[in-house]
């Protein structure tokens, strides 16, 4: 099983990253939340991976942290009707902190904001993962080699502040996906030590 790859980032889009290792280029499907953390093309990068084997294809999925990877795997293995494509879409719209908070709190409305996710699928996410969330972020090591000393945004200690900042923006009138994106960008700019108040202020900037 391929659990991670590290090499030179040859190219990237919001949903794919091509990593060259010893002259061989590997294309990984990634969520937008991982694409946001990629270094510049030509830099060294590490992705934590899941490989899905089918009769007609072998597809590589890459994530910035082990927590993101494990949450993706948990969704496709435990939630009825959620395959790799839908799981990637969910993780592209909401950060891991927001997803875990929504599942823990039974926030079906927030989950249903993800593209392609109806109310029934959102309810299944809550029912089938509520007892499991948190275990995926037990090890929140970062996937980007250039920031190896910085905890991932979904890491313990930061996830609560991130989720609280998202809730605050929603209370102020932001749409849930927009609030999550604004806080993600604020967290990337300020670093993992930012307080909830600092994240909110930066999100407004």
Image (cartoon, helix red, strand yellow):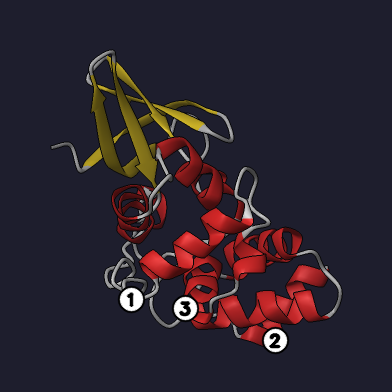
Q: Where is residue 178 in the image (x, y as percent from the top left)?
A: 75, 59
Please report the residue visible at 58 percent of the width from the left and 76 percent of the height from the top. Answer: 162
Determine if residue 176 is in view: yes
Question: What's the mark number on residue 80?
Answer: none
Residue drawn at point x = 23 percent, y = 16 percent: 55
Q: Position of residue 5 (x, y in %)?
A: 25, 37
- From the viewer's side, name the closer residue of 142 and 110: 110
Q: Distance between the residues labelled 3 and 2?
A: 23 Å
Q: Nearer the viewer, residue 26 or 174?
A: 174
Within 10 angstroms of label 2, few (less than 14), some, or many (20 or more) residues? few
What residue is shown with label 3? Answer: 104
Quadrant of the image occupied by residue 197: bottom right
Q: Name the residue under label 1.
A: 131
Give the residue drawn at x 60%, y 85%: 195
Q: Residue furthest front?
A: 120
Q: Which residue is drawn at 77% across and 74% down?
A: 170
Residue 95 as seen in the image, left or right of residue 76: right
State which tag comes first along the sequence, 3 or 2.
3
Q: In which quarter of the image is the N terminus?
A: top left
Pointers 2 and 1 in contact (C-beta within 8 Å) = no
Residue 157: x %, y % from top left: 43, 83
- SS at badge 1: loop
Q: Residue 197 carries which label?
A: 2
User: Which is more foreground, mark 3 or mark 2?
Assistant: 3
Name the residue furthest left.
1
Q: Which of the marked residues, 2 or 1, is nearer the chain's N terminus?
A: 1
């Amino acid at each position: 099983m391929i659990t991670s790859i590290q090499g030179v980032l040859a190219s990237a889009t919001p949903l794919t990253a091509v990593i060259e290792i010893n002259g061989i280029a590997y294309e990984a499907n990634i969520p937008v939340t991982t694409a946001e953390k990629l270094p510049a093309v030509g830099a060294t990068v590490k992705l934590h991976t899941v490989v899905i084997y089918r009769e007609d294809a072998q597809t590589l999925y890459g994530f910035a942290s082990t927590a993101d990877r494990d949450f993706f795997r948990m969704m496709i293995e435990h939630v009825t009707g959620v395959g790799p494509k839908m799981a990637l879409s969910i993780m592209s719209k909401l950060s891991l902190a927001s997803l875990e908070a929504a599942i823990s709190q039974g926030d079906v409305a927030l989950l249903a904001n993800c593209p392609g996710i109806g109310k029934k699928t959102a309810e299944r996410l809550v029912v089938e993962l509520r007892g499991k969330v948190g275990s995926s972020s037990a090890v929140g090591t970062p996937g980007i080699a250039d920031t190896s000393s910085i905890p991932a945004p979904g890491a313990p200690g930061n996830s609560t502040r991130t989720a609280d900042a998202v809730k605050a923006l929603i209370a102020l009138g932001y749409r849930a996906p927009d609030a999550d994106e604004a806080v993600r960008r604020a967290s990337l700019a300020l670093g993992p030590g930012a307080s909830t108040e600092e994240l909110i202020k930066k999100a407004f900037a």
